[in-house]
Structures are given as C-alpha cells and as structure tokens.
Amino acid sequence: MPKIVISDTSTLILFHKIEEFNLLQEVYTELITTPEIAEEFGEKLPDWIKIQTVSDKKYQNFLETQVDQGEASAIALATEYDDVLLRLDDLKARKLATQLKFKITGALGVIHKAKQMSIIDKVKPLIGKLLQTDFRIAENIIEEILQLNNE
C-alpha cells in the first residue's frame, strides 16, 4: 500500500453517513486531507486524519478549472509526494488523477480492501448501505466488486 493516502471529501462523507468512519482508519491507519476538504466535510475530523495545506496554490488554482476545489486540492497535494494513493469518487476527478498517473481508489475500493484485510466479512452489506445514500455507481461496477469478493 502506498505510504501516503490523501482523501477527498466524498469518501469521508459517505463513510460518515453509513456510520462506518472507523473502517477508514482500520484500512489506512492515517489519512491526509486539505483544509478545503476539511471545510467541505463540515465537522471536526478525528486526529488520525492530518490536514495539510497545498504548497503550490497556482497549480491547485489551475486544477480548479477542471474539477472542484476539494478534488483540486487533493490532486495538487498528491504532487508533493512520491508514493501516494488518492481517494476520489467523482468520475471527472478520477479521470484527471489517472491522466496524471496517480493511483486512485474510492468508496468501493475501501470496502474491497477492508475485505482483503479481513476487517469485514462481506462487502455486500456495506455496498447496500452506500446505495441508500446519494452515492451513484454503475451496476456493472458493483457486480464486479461482488464477484471479486466471491459474493
């Protein structure tokens, strides 16, 4: 697993909504996010999530022409590290991060990783909880995750 994991707001909000926030800590131990994302989240973040300001604000501003402020700050912060995993769920942000050669994951990736690490027994109940929120994902992706986890 990469040394640094940077989270955008969406996965923080989703895991908070489904009352599985602790799963993020169990899978990643430590996360980094930006002040912009912390503000978007709207609640105090736990101590195991470090908040770090982007050094290159010009690059962040440029990225904001393509994705929202939180996603731009996460991607800009990722450029400051060598071995980084970006947690993004927004398709446009994921495409941009992939073009920039970053490793990415999202909410379903977190759930899959938790199953691989034997933190959870089944992915299906958590996917069900995600689908009760405003989380949108194609059915074929859900089926792929279920198949990967023999469910």
Image (tube, rainbow, N blue to C red):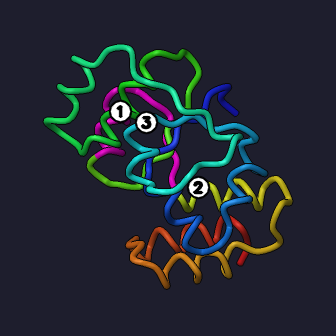
State yes or no: discs 2 and 3 in contact (Cβ < 8 Å).
Answer: no
Secondary structure, mark 3, is: helix
State yes or no: discs 1 and 3 in contact (Cβ < 8 Å).
Answer: yes
Residue nearest the viewer, comparing 83 with 147 = 83
Q: Nearer the viewer, mark 2 or mark 3?
A: 3
Which quadrant is the C terminus positioned in?
bottom right
Label 3 crowd (10 A; few <14 / some 14-19 / many >=20) = some
Q: Nearer the viewer, mark 1 or mark 3?
A: 3
Q: Identify residue for label 1.
A: 73
Provide the residue span drawn in magenta. 93-106
Q: Identify residue for label 2.
A: 109
Say if 107 sits above or below 49 in the image.
Answer: below
Q: Identify residue for label 3.
A: 35
Secondary structure, mark 1, is: helix
Indicate left or right for 78 with 127 as reference. Answer: left
State yes or no: discs 1 and 2 in contact (Cβ < 8 Å).
Answer: no
Q: Nearer the viewer, mark 1 or mark 2?
A: 1
Label 1 crowd (10 A; few <14 / some 14-19 / many >=20) = many
The residue shown at (56%, 27%) is: 84
In x, y percent, where is residue 9?
A: 44, 51
Q: CA distance from mark 1 to mark 3?
A: 9 Å
Residue nearest the viewer, comparing 146 with 130 = 130
The residue shown at (67%, 25%) is: 3
Comes first in the chain, label 1 or label 3? 3
Task: Please name the amino acid that badge 2 sits on.
Answer: Gly
